[in-house]
Image: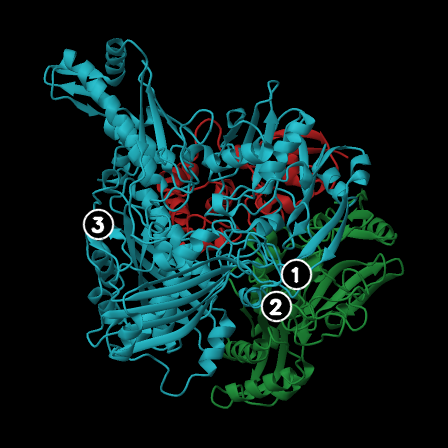
Amino acid sequence: MSRSSHHERGDIGARFPKVDGAGKADGSGVYTDDLAFPRMLHAKLLRSPHAHARILNIDVSAAERLPGVIATLVGAEMPAKYGVIPWTHDEQALATDHVRFIGDEVACVAALDERTAEEALRLIRVDYEPLPALLSAEEALAHPEIKVNEKAKVGNITKEVKLEFGPVDEAIATAAAITRERYQYAGSTHAPIEPHCAVARVDGDGNLTVWSSTQIPHYVHRELARVLGLPPARVRVIQPLLGGAFGGKSDPFSLEFCVAKLALKTGRPVKILFTREEVFYAHRGRHPMAMDVTVALDAGGRISAVDNKILIDGGAYASFGLVTAYYAGQLLTGPYRFGTYRFDSKRMYTNKPPCGPKRGHGSVQPRFAFEVALDEAAEKLGIDPIEVRRRNFIGEDVETVNGQRITSNGFLKCLELVEQASGWKERHGKLGPGRGLGVAGSMYISGTAYPVYPNEMPQSGVLVKLDRSGRVAVFSGASDIGQGVNTLLCQIAAEELGCDPREVTVVAADTDLTPVDMGAYSSRVTFMNGLAAREACEKLARKLKAAASVRVGDEIELELGTVRGPRGSISFAEACQLAEAAEGAPLSATGGYRTQKLGGNYRGGTIGASPAYSFTAHVAEVEVDEETGIWKVTRIWAAHDCGKALNPTLVEGQIEGSVYMGAAEAQMEEMVYGKQGLLFGPSLLDYKIPTSLDTPLIDALIVESHDPNGPYGAKEAGEGPLHPAIPAIANAIHDACGIRLRELPFYPQRVLQLLQARVPGQERRTAC
Amino acid sequence: MRHFTFERAKSVDEAVKGGAQPEAAFLAGGTSLVDLMKLEVLTPLRIVDVSRLDLQKIEARTGGLVLGALATNTDVALHPEVRRRLPALAEALLSGASPQLRNAATVGGNLLQRTRCAYFRDLATLCNKRTPRSGCDALEGWTRMHAILGGSNQCIAAHPSDMCVALAAFDARVKVRGPQGEREIALTDFHLLPEQHPDREFALSPGELVISVFVPTTAAAARSRYVKVRDRASYAFALVSCAAGLELSGGTSGRIIREARVALGGVGTKPWRSIEAERALAGQPPTKDSFRKAAELLLAGAQPRRDNAFKVELAKRTMVRALTLAAEGA
Amino acid sequence: MRLELRINGSVRSLEVEPLKRLLDVLREDLILTGTKEGCGEGECGACAVLLDGQLVNSCLVAVCQAAGASVVTIEGLSSSALTPLQRSFVECGGAQCGICTPGMIVAGQCFLDSGAAATDEAVREAIAGNLCRCTGYTKIVESIQHAARETR
């Protein structure tokens, strides 16, 4: 079907334009910072200048006297600890007695304007007693006597996970080829173009509303109520349009608590907009990891053992870190069959901005290490990189070595597509000096079977209401963070109800109005929210058909605004009216996604268990300037098994964005800290992210494996396709000039150094 | 942003008068000043807006180009005579900043732009350039972007400009007007080494306003190139850059360098012209070998640190490439 | 100071501090919130507007510099209906989260108005000062090229 005819429709599989696209294109869409209210105050946060210190005293009296200052706030006014994971509540909105990184929040001022609030911050006197700071995971491990965060039971360990599946050492001892190397993954951050922003307002009855640029309105709702000591029914959280998140807005942040508390204190609306510098301090980005990886192949090139010892630098707070420690190991066990597997991962508290879930949470780093190690081992056996991946394919409807259930699996098709599209057979190993191709594969979850807090309620809910005008309203708690779930909800309604997708209103992410959805993380939204929406719409469709059959007969088809039967057709609105009359009440229905019991039968076996897994393969093409070490990734072919593309344009967008973000980490991104723990250059000029000129041509290739559990067969597409970009680039650079990059990012000087250390004859890998 | 007074100069004389007052700063394109004032790195008490003065003209004269202080980077880069007579300057300008910054940034502002040393811009760190005698966190910090030439125990901030590197190589002269009248300063003398006073960056007296830049257009200038090595393809300062120009004599087989011009960016605390390297090249054949020897000479005095040691070799290779391209006349 | 700006075609007289950023004047004084603040340091291009026809970052323009000048923001590109370029962004998937979109569209329109051929390279160069974190630029480049085909 041509693109224009897709626009007429809007059912499943159509390239239906985003429902909020026009407002984004003409500037009328409202983001959190676009909100303003009469009498609104602007607040600013005072941050710790020490990486680690005890707070002896905070004196805000001079700040309070500054004309234009309306209120100040310190931690003692809301000392309760919080955190996104209920077992690791280790953060305070404002520190009461202990600061743990440069940038940790200690006080807040609300004033008539931002400039006055900033001036007032300079008048706040904080007496600190500096403590020794631990600035790397290694230091944190070596100094258990210095406690970064009291939440750590042992030393500075947030979480340690040790799991072994099968006799790993035995398999290694009898291997035909082994790679045993250390890989180092630098920390990087999300850098959404929209800085975090929150606005709070209290009405005359004491009801609090917080608008926030969050991707987890439900958790923000829970934590706000708990920390502020308010009944949850008195707190409302609304997520306006969100200007990029990528996992960086999936924790509750101090600004949300501060605007809320200040609104309660002053009775006036309060806004905080982070500066770009503050976005860097809020962080929750990719964890730096040091990984000692062993990959063993048997004589047939099959993976007989994988062993990974992982040291994770977590920063000052836990965030999702408990999960990170698991994901780093648990998500590596596909798309290949592992004979045996062992991992030991430790997440450490350190005196730096906290790390958290960045797109591809926890598994991007080990995936890089493993896919490069696999290439190295295969090379020793003379097996082509694509062939070794094909040979180790785990298959469909199987269980991984760590007990995860895999249903659909389109990985072989992904490999085949990128092999053909890149001309691999004719070009790999043959492109001439300084040019090369590399491949890598990966697997990712479509949501997690494990809700963040244990409960028996659905993980996602949708309420659909039909109006007698024919207008459909979908109330959904899910967060559209740019991925387009609101558009998919229209398409699901159109598919099931036969309404015109342009006559669907989506009311989303408003805790007063919409059913709960856990949030936009773990690639769960389309899968879980989509199933919930489908269920609600199916219920309504049954009622519509039953009511319409009186007029048009049985065997009814609902299609794009028309209800057609053997005895004629009526409009969708007429059907709604008939159904409402038959019901004797307004028409609505709800649907939910109920958590399935999944995962291995051992402690931690449910973490990483997902109702469906997506699969990806990339081939990257690079050019290396051997004189300067400057390299360029010119093109990436990315084939992704998303189960079913509910909207191919949106799926391609997710693949392209993922590929870009992965390539960016390989190219240039790194959070660098100075000796005292100060983040180097918290700006988008010093922390470089790729421009249009740095981003390769991206070929997004969709593979549909039709998963039995997903909505219409769909699986995730937003995070999986990031993973292979980094190892595919590393493997391509090896193909181009024979060097093995094991440390990120692949700065020109690292490439140059390896090029200079090359021994003659090593200039190119031998083609297999 | 702190408080300050504001005045718009209607003439150069008025600007000079305003600029001579204590704690005054000139405002032209604003791309540097507005940013640094917001960060409170700069806190002038008096802003003298010179953006409406009639200094935008670009003139191609016999023997050279005159660039008005308020000509934008875009206008200079796209000027046909600049491209023809001094391609390295056009290339340098187009390799700097981003399209919209080049539309606003001016020649004078580019000459006077402050370092992008992250420590200079971050009030949470110590910086002798920002606050004299307070200390320098860069010395023990992350120095990947810092200078390997011309540093002192007070400051190792790299000079950020691409334009100035091209101008330094080709004997540009800066015309300034101050309370004492007009004078010319050689571009290579315009920027000061940090030595013990890194806060003093320019050879300007209070109130002196840049009027224009004159750059002679020689045979070497016409055969010039600018090569920039950086982390990303737009809006990134140079890890290393090189402006090079050659005047060759003789036929295609027996060509000899009659005159050479070389300056490096990204490696020096100021735009780094090397007369020594240029002399070494004169009389030599335009081969990789002679280019490499000149590069070795230029970098002999480099003082690298852990994170920027790679710049020494990278600078040599970049210089060889720029000279090679210039020799090819491409 | 009191100054006049021609904003999206109509002259507005304002009493503002001379060094107030044009971005803040647009968003706060004129409630033109389509122009977004991404970094406030001239690095991201989300606040790009046309100043006398030239693409600039409004966060680095002191409003006094714009006195008497003509400013076109995203709101000034279209009246009742979307422009072909805006429509392309919607149809081709050029907007994901949308925060960079106004700046991209202003930069893209500036490029289209220049009449230059919309090759991949030229389009990428034209938007090299506008950062997008969602799309990998692929569908943004496509959107601009699609609009170029539609309008030329």
Quickly name the residue at label 3. A408
Quadrant in the picture for the N terminus of chain C:
top right
- Please report the residue visible at 73 percent of the width from the left and 39 percent of the height from the top: A117
Q: Gap in Å between the C-alphas at discs 2 and 3?
A: 48 Å
Disc number lying in front (3 or 1): 3
- Please report the residue visible at 43 percent of the width from the left and 29 percent of the height from the top: C81
- Please report the residue visible at 62 percent of the width from the left and 58 percent of the height from the top: A681
In percent of width and height, residue B202 lies at 78, 65
* Chain containing the residue with disc 3: A
Q: Do dots 2 and 3 share one subunit?
A: no
* Chain containing the residue with disc 1: B
Quickly name the residue at label 2. B145
What kind of residue is marked 2? Met
- Chain identifier matching the cyan colour in the rendered picture: A
Mark 1 secondary-structure assignment: helix
Mark 2 secondary-structure assignment: loop
Q: Is B54 or A244 nearer to us in this picture? A: A244
What kind of residue is marked 1? Ala
- For chain B, what colour was chosen? green
Q: Do dots 1 and 2 share one subunit?
A: yes
Q: Gap in Å between the C-alphas at discs 1 and 2?
A: 9 Å
Quadrant in the picture for the C terminus of chain C:
top left
Residue most toward the right?
Answer: B180
> Circles 1 and 2: CB distance less than 8 Å?
yes
Quickly name the residue at label 1. B118
Q: Along the horizontal axis of the image, is C124 left or right of B79? A: left
In percent of width and height, residue A399 lies at 23, 55
Q: Is A156 or A288 nearer to us in this picture? A: A156
Q: Is residue A496 above or below residue B25?
A: above
